Image: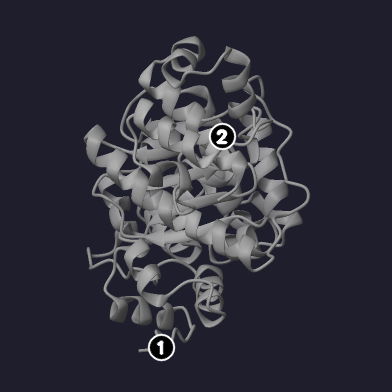
Amino acid sequence: MSDGLIAARIKVRREALGFTQDGVTKLLGFSDRQTLSAIENGDRRVSASELVRFAEVLAAPLTYFTDPFLLAGVGRFSWRQAGVPPQKLADYEEHAGRLIALYRALGAELGRRPPLLRQALGLSKASSYEEAMVAGERFAEEFGLGPVPSRRLAEVMQDRLGILVLMVDALRGVSGAACHLPELDAVLINRQEVAGRRHYDLAHELFHILTWDAMPPDHLEDTVAAPKGRVEQLADNFAAAVLMPSSVIAPFGPWADLADDALVSRLNDTAEALGVSASALRWRLVAAGMLTKGRAKTVDENALRNNGRKPVAVEAPPLFSRPFAELVTQAVDEGLISARKVAGLLDMPLDDVVDAFAAQGVAFDPGL
């Protein structure tokens, strides 16, 4: 555990309790506030006896300050959710944080370096929706997402941008999340959502990762609330353009001259082929100038539900991701962590971890 993380957790815990530096200085028995300030800034190390005293004063177990598999003090989440009780979400955030912290800690042990430079979009809250769409189009082109961008997006995020992407069994009501750390970015997607929703959430959270410093997202985004905030609307426009660039959707046209039934059929078939929702495609066509808003409004929303297909059980992608499974497996193979410890952090039976990693094409040997 680095001194920097201990320092960050001391500061976060103090602020969470509403304690001032002066107040904690007195409780700890330091001669002046500058001592505590130096500790919180990482300029002075904390002795073992002082750390025990911090745990007492800040009413936290020692593991809160020393556990490398926590994100307390450094990780910031933004959740796409609807109606999830605050305490349940807080508990799940701790679990999700452990997945990311596991990857971060083992990566450091294995000498994996984060990207030297982070990619960022040149957008701000003052940017127009058109500028966000242009950025999405350019992203799809410059990163070579191809004729079906949804198929390659996660791969590009992981391999080209160094973003950890994890498919998870999230709480009901949670569709996805972005997490920003000083040395790592991560996106979590609820794998139980339909494919179109998963892909859209992935592109939406990518926007937040690429604009975090310029316009940090809210901790909670209500996916059913209206109207949306400006940052979320910018993210929506970027995501739609990433998944449905003009160069990709234009060849499926012309759209404007189709009869009503033919338009519905074309929307559903095209959306299914692109891994998006037909409703999202309809409004993307309007934004791209390929369909008028008036004509789009004449399309029955019910006819686009489930892309015109009969509802079927969601075919969920495998848990986690291949890079995650490969790194954890390498760490176990090299004796940096035990298989049982991994299973405990993932909150899964050991056999289920073996199966989950196998689904990613990674042979995980618990060594039992």
| Residue 83 placement, left or right of 130 | left
Quickly name the residue at label 2: 7
Residue at left offset 50%, top offset 62%: 274
Given residues 238 and 214, the one toward you in this image is 214
Q: Is residue 293 above or below residue 342?
A: above
Q: Examine the rendered structure and indicate whether residue 37 appears above or below residue 87.
A: above
> What colouring does the structure picture have?
one colour
Mark 2 or mark 1: name the one nearer the start of the chain. 2
* Residue toward you, 150 or 305: 150
Q: Give left or right: position of 62 versus 110.
A: left
Q: Residue 146: horizontal and vertical position, in percent?
A: 66, 65
Q: Residues within 10 Å of mark 1 (few under 14, many from 20)?
A: few
The answer to whether 94 is drawn above or below residue 9 in the figure is below
Classify mark 1: helix, strand or loop.
loop
Is residue 146 visible from the viewing direction of this image?
yes
SS category of the residue bearing label 2: helix
Q: Residue at x 58, y 12 (%)?
A: 32
Viewer-side residue, 19 vs 295: 19
Nearer to us in this view, 187 or 21: 21
Can residue 291 be seen from the camera position used here? no
For residue 234, what is the image quadrant?
A: top right
For badge 2, the amino acid type reads: Ala
For mark 1, what is the residue? 367
Quadrant in the picture for residue 47:
top right
Indicate left or right for 85 with 193 as reference. left
Which quadrant, please, contains the C terminus? bottom left
Cα distance in 3D space between marks 2 and 1: 36 Å
Q: Position of residue 315 (x, y in %)?
A: 32, 70
Tag count? 2
Q: Position of residue 363 (x, y in %)?
A: 47, 87
Indicate the amino acid at tag 1: Gly
Q: Is residue 166 left or right of residue 164?
A: left
